[in-house]
Image (cartoon, helix red, strand yellow):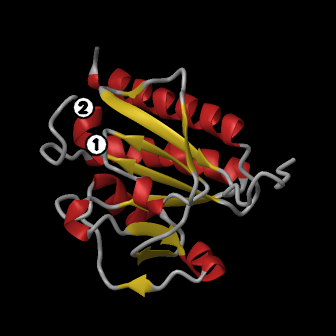
Amino acid sequence: MEYKEELQQIGCDVRKATEELFSLADLKQGQVFVVGCSTSEVQGEKIGSAGSDEVAKVLLTELRHMADRKLVYLAIQCCEHLNRALVVERSAQQKYGWPEVSVIPVRHAGGALAAQAMQDFTDPVVVEEIAAHAGIDIGCTLIGMHLRPVAVPVRLVQKQVGQALIIAAKTRPKLIGGARAVYQ
């Protein structure tokens, strides 16, 4: 497959996965959707070894389009070198009261997708932690720390983006109480 065709397929893969998760998670306007991604894994390489600006651009274009259509906030997780901080729009940071931190993600410290988000978001800021309502982990980047309790795995038909395995999750409110509690 030609490189341009591979990039188109990657865009199609992430669009399908995101559409399916949005449908199953029933996200509401103003909620938060977190994405962790290794562009290296998407290309079939070891995580952190072959970050790609081109792959990041394709992925972010699709993710932003989907989030904008659903009117949800998009949060892009950085890599472990930035302690998995996140790039978000300032409007989300202010709405949810997340403290801003000072760092600029780049491909080798933050990851290609986070670096692309810093370039493409309207008013990007970096925060240390969030509690997202749903998310997709592309390439085993460990987004769980940024999901609200209780995270519920979502089995998607779309199992990969490029060569990277994907894991998706939605969240639900905690069920509290005892034998007399009513949940519906």
- Residue 20: x and y in percent read 62, 31
- Residue 90: x and y in percent read 55, 78
| Residue pictured at 50% horizontal, 61% vertical | 75
Does 173 sit left or right of 103 as displayed?
Answer: right
Q: Give the amino acid type for the residue marked by disc 1 in the picture.
A: Thr
132, above or below 124, in the image: above
Q: How many marks?
A: 2
What crowding class fits label 2: few (fewer than 14 Cα within 10 Å), some (14-19), or many (20 or more)?
many
Q: Give the amino acid type for the residue marked by disc 2 in the picture.
A: Gln
Say the numbered circle drawn on residue 39: 1
93, above or below 181, in the image: below
| Residue pictured at 19% horizontal, 65% vertical | 81
Instruction: Name the residue tied to disc 2.
Output: 43
93, above or below 75, in the image: below
Q: Residue furthest front?
A: 179
Q: Quadrant of the N terminus?
A: top left
Marks 2/1: CA distance?
6 Å
Say the numbered circle drawn on residue 96: none
Work out whether residue 41 or residue 130 is closer to the camera in this orientation and state it: 130
Does 141 sit left or right of 65 as displayed?
Answer: left
Secondary structure of residue under mark 2: loop
Secondary structure of residue under mark 1: helix
Indicate the quadrant where residue 110 lies.
bottom left
Q: Are marks 2 and 1 in contact (CB under 8 Å)?
A: yes
- Residue 16: x and y in percent read 56, 28
What crowding class fits label 1: few (fewer than 14 Cα within 10 Å), some (14-19), or many (20 or more)?
many
179, above or below 105, in the image: above
- Residue 50: x and y in percent read 15, 43
Work out whether residue 106 or residue 97 is closer to the camera in this orientation and state it: 97
Q: Residue furthest left?
A: 49
